[in-house]
Image (cartoon, rainbow, N blue to C red):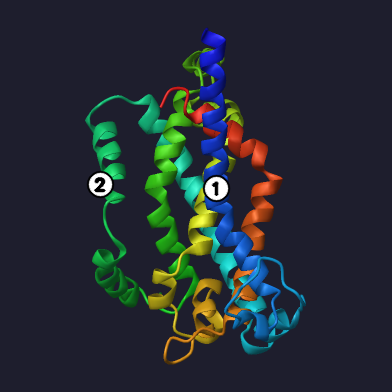
Amino acid sequence: MSLRTSRPARAGQYLALLCYLVFLAFPFLWLISTAFKPAPELGSLHPTWIPDSPTLENFRQAFDEQPLLRAAGNSLTVALSAALIAVVIATPMAYVMARQRGRLATAATGWVVVSQAFPFVLVIIPLFLVLKNLHLINSLFGLIMVYVVWSLPFALWMLVGYVRAVPAELEEAAAVDGAGRLRTLVSVTVPLLAPGIVATAMFAFITAWNEFFFALVLLKSPEKQTLPVILTHFLGAEGVADLGPLAAAAFLATIPSLAIFAIIQRRITGGMLAGAVKT
């Protein structure tokens, strides 16, 4: 009886998962289809999934109209730097928050939660004024610092769970052998946190790679603009999109994040499971 009951339930779960995957994949698949369609098919009243006459003309136009390679280089520099700095700062902070119990750890945890509730619009004016006084407006370094600060609470929240999953007995054994706190963190804890650090860095990278609002406000020079900002240049003055080149450029913009996810997928999955053990 239980077997008969479990089979329909399992089939329902698989069906729900399939529907969810289709829901997630539909925009990306339609984007790919649009990127390879010629102009007459883009204006057709009866769109099709598979282009009747696939073409690379949209990609050629995208590269001719906008400096996609330069913008991609800016985005890659900003995203990699922000992810690396955020992880380097967050790892020792997460270690202290996970191992130390008291008002300071509680206050830090509260800051992590509250900071995620602030909308971009609320902080952009004071942030702009601070960066202006520091002469970091229209600077990739200034944008990197903004992304580090913005992604740091989430990185801390993730890494605290990973640190708590590391047995404290290992650190106690290292202390008995004469290792200090820093040596224990570097030689014992960090190697065990590798999956979690990779997962955290990946999410910080994706956040910086896709971010648009801060980059639009803080970067004025065309040669310093990131890829999400450049993509808006395919919209005309009246909001009419150059759909083919826009779809081609947007498809190219998704490739780096997809490639990184494919390369380190196992580490990300392992890190997420490890961090969920004692969160």
x, y percentage for residue 54? 76, 75
Where 165 sits versus 238, above or below? above
The image quarter in which residue 135 lies: bottom left
Q: Nearer the viewer, residue 278 or 166?
A: 278
The image quarter in which residue 10 lies: top right
x, y percentage for residue 224? 53, 79
Q: Earlier in the sequence, mark 2 or mark 1?
A: 2
The reply to whether dot 2 and dot 1 touch (C-beta < 8 Å) is no
Q: Nearer the viewer, residue 232 or 172?
A: 232
Residue under label 1, please give it. 201
Q: Residue at x 25, y 46 (%)?
A: 114
Kind of residue at disc 2: Val
Q: Is residue 161 left or right of residue 40?
A: left
Q: Which mark is residue 115?
A: none
Quadrant placement of the C terminus: top left
Where 162 sits versus 210, above or below? above
Q: Residue at x 51, y 46 (%)?
A: 88
Q: Residue at x 47, y 28 (%)?
A: 276
Residue under label 2, please give it. 114
Q: Is residue 196 visible?
A: no
x, y percentage for residue 181? 47, 27
Q: Residues within 10 Å of mark 1 (few under 14, many from 20)?
A: many
Q: Residues within 10 Å of mark 2 (few under 14, many from 20)?
A: few
Q: Residue at x 29, y 39 (%)?
A: 108
Give me the C-alpha separation between circle 2 and circle 1: 22 Å
